[in-house]
Amino acid sequence: MQRRYRTIPDLKINESARAIAFDDSELACKLTSMGLLPGTRIEMIRKSPFGSAYYVKADGVRLALREEEAASILLEV
Amino acid sequence: MADGSPSLKIALIGNPNSGKSTVFNQMTGLRQRTGNFPGVTVEVKEGTLRFPNGNEATLFDFPGTYSLYPTSTDEKVVASVLANPSDPYFPDAMVYVADVTNLEKHLLLFTQLLDLNIPLLLALNMSDSASELGIKVNASKLSESFGVPVIPISGRTGHNTMRLILELEKMVNRVPSTVVRVPFYPLTDSEKQVSEAIRQNLGVVNPYRALLLAHHVAWLHFLTQPEKETASAIISTKKFQSLRAQVDETLERYDRFIPISQAAVVSPPAFPNTPTDRIDAVLTHRLGGPLIFFAVMMLVFQAIFDWSVYPMDWIESGFGALSVFLTAQLPAAWYTELLTEGILAGLGGILVFVPQIAILFLLISILEEVGYMSRVVFMFDKTMRRFGMNGRSMVSLISGSACAVPAIMSSRTIGNWQERLITVMVTPFISCSARIPVYLVLIGLAVPAVKLGGVLSLQSLVFGAMYALGVLAAFASGWAMKRWLHRREHSFLAIELPVYRIPHWRNVILNVWEKVRAFIVGAGKIILVVSIALWGLSRFGPGDSIEQADQLAQTEAQQLNMDSIESEGLVQQRRLEASWAGQAGKVIEPVIRPLGYDWKIGIALLTSFAAREVFTGTLAVLYNMGGAEADINDRSENAAKATLRERMKNEKFSDTGKPVYTLATALSLLVFYALAMQCFSTLAVVSRETGSWKWAALQFTFMSLAAYLGAWAVYVVFS
């Protein structure tokens, strides 16, 4: 079954979407333990000054994620 | 662990940003100290907790972690201690500190701890903020659902600290002391098989702990080789997929505790735009963010420079006066000199940097407490990664401008070993406080006191350039090391950005005290030993060379009709030249000549290995400053510096008759000091943090090479 996903880099500023699954199991472990789970609402706040990290809110908790970390979180379309 | 500490052990565990440290401070007050977990170079804070009934317990503040599936050295500590009931830090009871305003994010680790069947108490921290936000908390409902005592507290106001301690007291006095609970997370069939097998073969009682051993067999140090092999065999036979299982377990736990949390904690709808969001819009702005950061750093360094002058001068004069007093009171023998010139001078040399270090760490600590540092990590992570480091390395590099020793220790929060190693290796390039006296003397000597365009002081510019050189060298080395090492371990940023808050002053002060202590005790011990050793090498010489030098000097002084102070100075000078250190200086002269140095500078280079600022004191002796050596490092003693400058200007090479201190030589010396590794304390800390001497040795080698080549290049260019 082909599911279509978006990732955080696809979101516009202040746009939010729900997390569905993770692409990288090691990262999944780290992120889930920080409270970023399937079902969590993720809002993209801004990109870092040098462009490769994201400031997001995951159900209200503010997190900074690298581009590859952000890209591994599969969001609903 | 300290000997004589109470045998009852209580662990304080929680997420980073749970306010755990504040609670720790509330519970122990000043009765705390820092130590090291054995086998891992992570610090543990321990303190004495006094119960109302008079008994005492030792309270350990474990590093903050999100789960028992750790991703950095810090986080591994909790998992490794709790996996091993024989560990010296294994607790008799635990207090879990959770931020009640974000409870759901804090319960994962809590439910994992529940399953370990150790007496556990849940402290709902930040209950003061919760009431302000209109969040209603039903502690008894949580207590019923989880089966443990639950107490709302506030680390900030101290609310319910006493109740927490009382509840803890009841818990530890309960008989029987073991707890058996219904597991919060029921193991899956495949997990049960693995857990059972581990329990039988390794003699583990708790099923969840057995599962943890299976997950972490690769790095748990306490397991013996046969145990590791048995466990690994079980894992492969049962086809246990550790990562997969970890994620599934985490998700299952969330599914189970979120309903509990939602039933007991009711929050009003959150305002979308809080003060933190508004502040971050400015501080992490794409353009403004970094600019603001550099402005803040400039202010911090300016403050350190301006504020530390007074206490530094007091300490200098204090030690100077003490030295004079002792010299007068005690008989003129070698042990008096050992006391005044070896020990006292060494001690003074250590303590004089305390004001600078304290102020720097005060300001850094405030920035951390407020929550700004995580934003810095966010903004600079990509840049730091280009040079082989992590956003978190920024904190170490900034701290390195005070002293590399605590700066290197603060790299422990970096999860990836390679990033941490590179941070540790390059931090000493950052110009630390000890280099400042050297810079000042040499710049004063060689750089004219002019103002470019009538505004910008040339001397300040060169001073700034030396700092810039250090920063450049650090990043260049990072880049080179990154290319050279090829480890492909997983590296994380994934950092939480906490809500901005007013710093809790007690935390800040205690944090500063910890760092200053680390410097005094860690760096201090070594500096003192090396100071004394170098004093010995400068005071004694082969055979009777010292006595001969004495006689020659006195004859010379008489012939030149010197007064008593001057002739005493001449005696000191000749003695130094004849001593072991002096001989060594002459021996290395051919090697340092290409850099523009003579053997006297050679002596000063060697003595600076005790502490970099000894350079100026040594020069003062070598150029016979009379009694003014003691004033040379005093920042306000411009007269002494002027005298030294005059003497230095008159120094000539014995074979060519040309002046020694040309612009080229001075600049070359500046570059040498900026880049050279002349700090045994740093080398000691590096070898401790990296687990072997080889990295410290490598660091010494490449920094010495960089210093030599850099100084040589500058000398050639400017001469």
Image (cartoon, coloured by chain):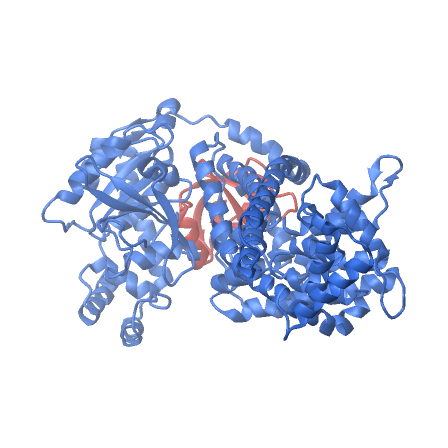
Chain colours: A red, B blue
Residue positioned 34% across, 26% down in the render? B135
Q: Residue lying farthest left?
A: B175
Please state if B117 lies on the left or on the right of B218 as rendered.
Answer: left
Please state if B7 lies on the left or on the right of B245 as rendered.
Answer: left
Residue positioned 64% across, 47% down in the render? A51
| Residue B635, picture quadrant | top right
Q: Nearer the viewer, residue B59 or B491?
A: B59
Give percent across and percent down for residue B372. Answer: 54, 38
Give percent across and percent down for residue B462. Answer: 79, 48
Give percent across and percent down for residue B399. Answer: 58, 47
| Residue B576, picture quadrant | bottom right
Tell me if I can see residue B178 in this picture.
yes
Please state if A71 lies on the left or on the right of B550 as rendered.
Answer: left
Q: Nearer the viewer, residue B482 or A64?
A: B482
| Residue A45, picture quadrant | top right
Above/below status of B444 relative to B719: above
Q: Nearer the viewer, residue B304 or B106?
A: B304
Residue positioned 64% across, 35% down in the render? B303
